[in-house]
Image (cartoon, rainbow, N blue to C red):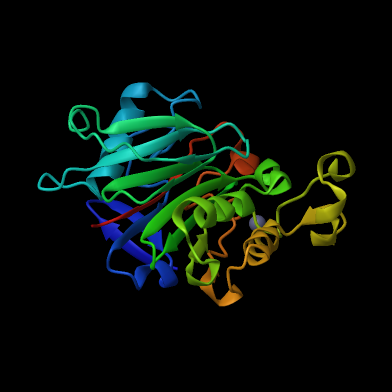
Amino acid sequence: MLIRKKDGLFYFQFHNLSQFPKVRHGIFTRHGGCSPKPFQSLNSSFSVGDDPVNVKRNRRSIADCFINKAHEGSMVYLKQIHSDQVRIFKHRSESNLSERPEITMKGDAVITELPHRYLLIQVADCQAVLFYDPVRHVVANVHSGWRGSVKNIIGKTVSFMKQHFMSNPKDIVAGIGPSLGPCCAEFVNYRSEIPENLLKYRTRSNYFDFWTVSRDQMKSEGIPGKNIETGNLCTRCRTDLFFSFRGEQSTGRFSGVIGILP
Ligand SMILES: [Zn+2]
């Protein structure tokens, strides 16, 4: 991944998605926000106990990286519920967006073909998985933790892109954000939590490789392996850069964002 800096915020970008000038994306670190411990500092979640005033400021800082005053635009948030619900964002009427630049929908994946709609997923160990189809000019962002992996929300999202946007999976480019790596994804209760079809991803004793699970879920839908980039940064190992639920328990959520220009 590439590291960028804008207005005091650091974010990572995937090499593959960076090649497309009409895609804007970033995986933000935990730094550059205003929240105090244990949410230091760029926490974007209202549901972890942080002061909402700080969360709003942090969200504004992230939005400022994408929406400038000349561009009308909005951030699209999900009320994430560890489900396999895929949402399509298609509000065509723009009249009130400038007054209410944040939109929240319930679910764990969101797809849009509308320009200047920046889809944001919040995580701390779960994966934010970014997708772009350069032919149909469609983007998606997915929240996939281990429950999402079990429900294959990634495969379902790709399937929605094929079904609703005529995407050819061979064209789709994807990036798997920093998340719990095979080094730290220990599931002591895996016999009751992880279904039979995912047991082959067990790497040693109780540890699982959910990065490879996600890659395989994409490949099963027809996305070529060469189109998939894994961030290869483990959040639990890198709490200096990212929030980690396993590493810190009470902590914030960092943000993965993707959107398109017209
Ligand atoms: Zn690790």
Residue 180, position as x, y percentages in the image: 63, 52
Is 175 located above or below residue 144 in the figure?
below
Is 90 located above or below residue 202 in the figure?
above
- Locate residue 216: give its quadrant: bottom right
Residue 187, position as x, y percentages in the image: 80, 46
State the residue at coordinates (22%, 45%): 64
Q: Is residue 89 left or right of residue 243?
A: left
* Depth order, front residue of 237/170: 170
State the residue at coordinates (24%, 28%): 100
Q: Can residue 58 be seen at all in this image of the molecule?
A: yes
What is the number of callouts on the image? 0
Residue 218, position as x, y percentages in the image: 62, 62
Q: Quadrant of the N terminus?
A: bottom left
Q: Quadrant of the C terminus?
A: bottom left
* Depth order, front residue of 112/226: 112
Q: Can residue 202 be seen at all in this image of the molecule?
A: no
Ligand 1 in which quarter: bottom right
Residue 146, position as x, y percentages in the image: 69, 45
Is 188 located above or below residue 53 in the figure?
below
Is 133 located above or below residue 127 in the figure?
below
- Locate residue 83: give its quadrant: top right
State the residue at coordinates (40%, 30%): 104
Q: Residue furthest bottom?
A: 226
